[in-house]
Image (cartoon, helix red, strand yellow):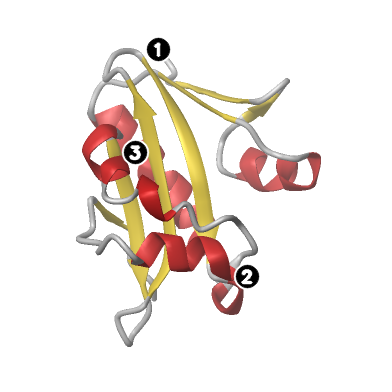
């Protein structure tokens, strides 16, 4: 199966190519700067080593983090990779003491994020049970 790896070694051009595969702007100038500024990221590769999934959490490394850019290559959707990416990021947030993770998404993705443990509101909210 596909392994989701925290801080997977990713070259500067891989995420822009993945973004482009889903129809998003490449934002080539964001990388590798994003890797230096975000709290941590997760990546998944296929059996040939191609990056097929990516996401990250950014913030001030305090109680709250913001999850962004959960991307799964179109040829690898419906395999559980997206859920694995999100849950791996949430587990890492918990391990690092981040108690609240928010994200924004379109209505069509609400069920996906609810499946991952988020409460639907004006955005998404995950809060560590105390």
What residue appears at the point 30 percent right and 80 percent down from the top-left corner? 49
The relative height of residue 82 versus residue 89 in the rendered view (above or below) is: below
Among the two numbered marks 1 and 3 on one chain, the one whose residue lies closer to the N terminus: 3
Left or right, 119 with reference to 57: right
**Farthest front residue?**
29
- Give the residue pinned by disc 1: 130
Marks 3 and 2 close (CB-CB < 8 Å): no
- Give the residue pinned by disc 3: 91
- The picture quadrant where one finds residue 75 is bottom right
Among the two numbered marks 3 and 2 on one chain, the one whose residue lies closer to the N terminus: 2
Q: Quick one: SS at disc 3?
A: helix
Pick the residue in front: 35 or 54.
35
Q: Position of residue 118 (x, y in %)?
A: 59, 32
What residue appears at the point 45 percent right and 56 percent down from the top-left corner? 84
Give the CA separation, mark 3 to mark 2: 21 Å
Q: Position of residue 122 (x, y in %)?
A: 72, 20
Q: Which callout, 1 or 2, points to the residue nearer the camera?
A: 2
Q: Position of residue 74 (x, y in %)?
A: 61, 73
What residue appears at the point 32 percent right and 50 percent down from the top-left corner? 31
Residue 78, numbered circle: 2
Q: Residues within 10 Å of mark 2 (few under 14, many from 20)?
A: few
**Farthest right residue?**
107
Pick the residue in front: 72 or 31.
31
Q: Quick one: SS at disc 1?
A: loop
- The picture quadrant where one finds residue 46 is bottom left
């Amino acid at each position: 199966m596909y392994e989701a790896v925290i801080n997977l070694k990713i070259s500067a051009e891989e995420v822009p190519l993945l973004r482009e595969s889903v129809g998003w702007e490449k934002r080539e100038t964001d990388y590798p700067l994003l890797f230096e500024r975000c709290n941590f990221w997760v990546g998944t590769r296929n059996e040939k080593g191609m990056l097929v999934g990516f996401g990250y959490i950014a913030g001030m490394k305090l109680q709250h983090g913001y999850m962004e850019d959960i991307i799964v290559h179109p040829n690898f959707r419906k395999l559980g990779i997206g859920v694995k990416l999100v849950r791996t990021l949430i587990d890492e947030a918990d391990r690092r003491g981040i108690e609240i993770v928010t994200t924004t998404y379109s209505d069509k993705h609400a069920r996906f994020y609810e499946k991952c443990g988020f409460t639907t509101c004006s955005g998404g909210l995950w809060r560590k049970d105390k």
